[in-house]
Image (tube, coloured by chain):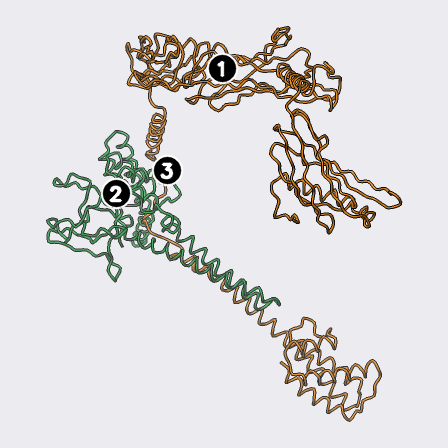
Chain colours: A orange, B green
Amino acid sequence: MIPTPAIQFNQGSFLRFLLLIFCSVSTAPNHLLGQTQKLRVESSFQPATITIAQNTIYKIVIHGSQENAQGAMPNVSGLSISNSPQTFRSASFINGVPSVRLEMSFQVRPTSMGEHTIPAWSIRVGSNTLQVPPATVNILAPNQKDKIRQDADAKNKNDLKQASFIEFKNPRPYLYEGETVSTQIDLYIWDRLPVSRIERVPQKEGAAFSTTELGQPKEKRNQTKFNKTYTIFSWPVGLTAAIAGSQNIQFSTSIRVRVKSRGNSPFNSPFFNDPFFGFGREVSITVQSALQTLEIRKLPMNERPDSFHGAIGNFTVCTIPDTDRVSLGDPVRLSLEIEGKGNFAAMPAPKLESNINFKIGPPAFSFEGDEVTKHTGKQSFEYILTPMNSGLIEIPSIPFSYFDPILEKYFSVNTSPHSLRVDPGEKWVDPTPQIQKNEQSKNHLSTKDLFQTENEPGTWINNISNESLLNSKLFWSAQSFPLFFLFGLIFYGWKRKQSGRDAFRQKQSLLKKQMREAISYKDSGLFFRATRERLRLEIGTFYKYPNPLSLSSNELISLLVKGGNEQQLVADIRDILDTSDNYEFAASEEDPKSLDEISKKMNKLLKKFK
Amino acid sequence: MKIYSQVLYLSLFLSILPFSWSTQQDRLFYDAVRAEASGDLDSAIQLYSESAKISNSSNLHGNLANLHFKKEQFGRSILHFEKALLLDPGNSELSANLNFAYEMANTSPHNDNFANTYFSSKFLSFWVAIAALIFWAGLITSAYYLLFSTNKKSLFYLLPLWICLIALSAYASKLSLSEHNKLNRTVIVFETSSEHNKSKNVPLRRFAGETNTANTNVTSGENLLIDFDNNGNPKLHKVSDGEVWYLARSRDGRKKGWIKENEFGWILDPE
């Protein structure tokens, strides 16, 4: 049977399968040596008979190949076979014939006595599938030597437990829900254990309880237990039961110890090899207390007083006012002191509400006593009472109830009422309305001040009229200024434009005259100069160029193109300009007879452009 | 010679006449101040009122308003504070007094919202001046750009802006003008002194006449607008006993009815 990934029987088989692949791949080059040798597989246990306390080796030898081996070893009940085989490859010449082989050794630990057989199974080597023959191991009962070793291991383990441990004593067999008890957590550290430090204070494991914060531990040295000498670190703690039922609680911490080396771990043999573990590295060890199960009972509902708000313990209660005589509106401090043992940390303030005689604010808290566990001491609630009425009034008593977990009963106590003489003073008024009244009175006064009679009549006016700018002649007259200014501006602009046109016409007529004279005198130079000037003047002015006479021929052409003129027109004017330029700069000769034609043509062109 | 002397005396009389009037109103004013100081408020009111018939001053109407206020005639007090403020618009003391009088009369001044405050009659001149300024500035700037500037593209941005500003300032002027015109029609309701009506409410009758039923009631100190006809004259009706009734409505137009001429006072005397 060829093993495939689909026939991976279990995780162990799969891992072994992978390991076989790995071992084979890592030695792939060697397989060539055994190509001529016949493939053969052997399997055996070495030794084949062991006691149950011993281990044996399951060995597979593949002769004739060092190639990749794949297969899935079957599981055998009663044997635990390791997943990490040791491999060994060898090559030799026997009688001149090359011989190669692959050995794979699996650690086997027996789990039950009797004869156990690994049945035949298939293994794939290269392209060949081979059958691994069955192998049998005989597991005997433990002998005397095995028993001695087991006892020694157990003793070592027990000794390790005794090296450091936590003790947590439950003060009572059961607790009530919400009850707080004072207890202690003891961390024992054997003096021969080389502890460098305690990494953290013990942590509670158990959601059904809450604890007070653990502070600095008390240290006791040379305490003997289990025939060993210990140093004990003790943390007092207040433990409050939160959830009813049978609840587990455990404390754990970690300590740091020095060990000599990896192979000399304190877990293996911390006491016999080297009691001080040398000065090697440090390791962290978790130390736990024994898991304890506590019963948490619900508080009884029967006879529960209305004034019970969760106080559990044994308390005495009294109230003390700071004075017995005040003026109306002056505050009085009333201290409610609850003393005894109980759940001070979880105790709410007894209710004392405002009434017609007193306005009462929320109390301030203070605690005196065992600050660590908050189990024993005196809790004070300080109320501020503001008397609202004068006379001899009574500070009311405060009802307080608690549950005694020892007697398992509710108790209700009432504080003594106190008489308070309140002298009639300035009546207390709510400051907010007072401010408003003050503001109102100020407004009223200021308003009175406003109504003052003037002793002088002031300026007399015959008629009260509803005058506005629209009725004002001055306003309308004033509009003439910007109007005249506008007219002036327009006139000036018009004149300026006119003067510009006149200048243009003068220049235009001058150039025309020059052109005519040039034609009559056949003066080509003068004609083309005047022609070019006229083109500049007329085109530049037409396109409102600020300084037309400075335009070059190219600029004139570009103005015409931008103006959207016909291409023929632009080409004709370009010709005239080119002719003028050529004549002037290249001394080109032009037939004087054609000057008249050029003039006429230009006159026509200048009328066409837009 | 006799004629010359008569002309001389006549001219002297004519030149002294205005001063003699001034003296008379001053005398009445000072008499009123003295009467008020002596605690004779009724005489003081009478003297101030006589003085007001001759001429007006801010202090005169302020004092008269104070006296009416002291006599808890809040409607008349409001009327005279309004008159005083028209003569002296910037007087903050008068404004405060007027507001307090409105408060005491349990009425509210008509210009207590944003629109009535900033587009009120008082702001008409301001908005007109602004409109004129924007108009001319825009016109002159446009002319300049058209005639002198080579870069006329700016006109494309300036013209719409100018038109918008003109429109806004014209609209503001129109709103103010509307309020301004309403002031000519505004009257303040007085307290009734009738034996039959001891409340501060004044009835607006369905028809002109004392015996007619009330259409609605208005409180003293409340602003009313008198209806005007197309010719710009108030709509009035003179009954047989000589009483003149005016058709009035509240500023919001919800109340309308006839009111007797002695039950209100004009802020601006009708022409």
* Chain letter, disc 2 residue: B
Q: Residue furthest bottom?
A: A593
State whether discs 2 and 1 lie on one chain.
no
Asked if the residues shown at circle 2 and circle 3 are in contact, with their CB atoms under 8 angstroms apart, the answer is no
Specify which label sits upstream in the sequence, 2 or 3. Answer: 3
For the residues labelled 3 and 1, the Cα–Cα distance comes to: 75 Å
Query: Chain letter of disc 3?
Result: B
For disc 1, the chain is A
Q: Name the disc covering residue A238, or none.
A: 1
Q: Is residue A315 left or right of residue B24?
A: right
Image coordinates of residue B254 in percent, x first then y, are 24, 51
What amino acid is labelled 3 in the image? Glu
Q: Nearer the viewer, residue B105 or A53?
A: A53
CA neighbours of label 2 inside 10 A, class few (<14), some (14 to 19), many (20+): many
Q: Which residue position is annotated with label 3?
A: B93
Image spot of residue A510 (x, y percent)? 71, 82
State the SS at label 2.
loop
Question: Cα distance, mark 2 to mark 3?
Answer: 19 Å
Percent x, y of residue A480: 47, 62
- In front of the other: A554 or A205: A205
List the single residue furthest toward the right. A96
Q: Amino acid at mark 2?
A: Gly
Mark 2 or 1: the one toward you? 1
Relative vertical location of residue B196 with respect to residue A244 in this rendering, above or below: below
Mark count = 3
Describe the element under mark 1 as helix, strand or loop. strand
The disc labelled 1 sits on which kind of residue?
Gly
User: Label 2 belongs to which residue?
Assistant: B221
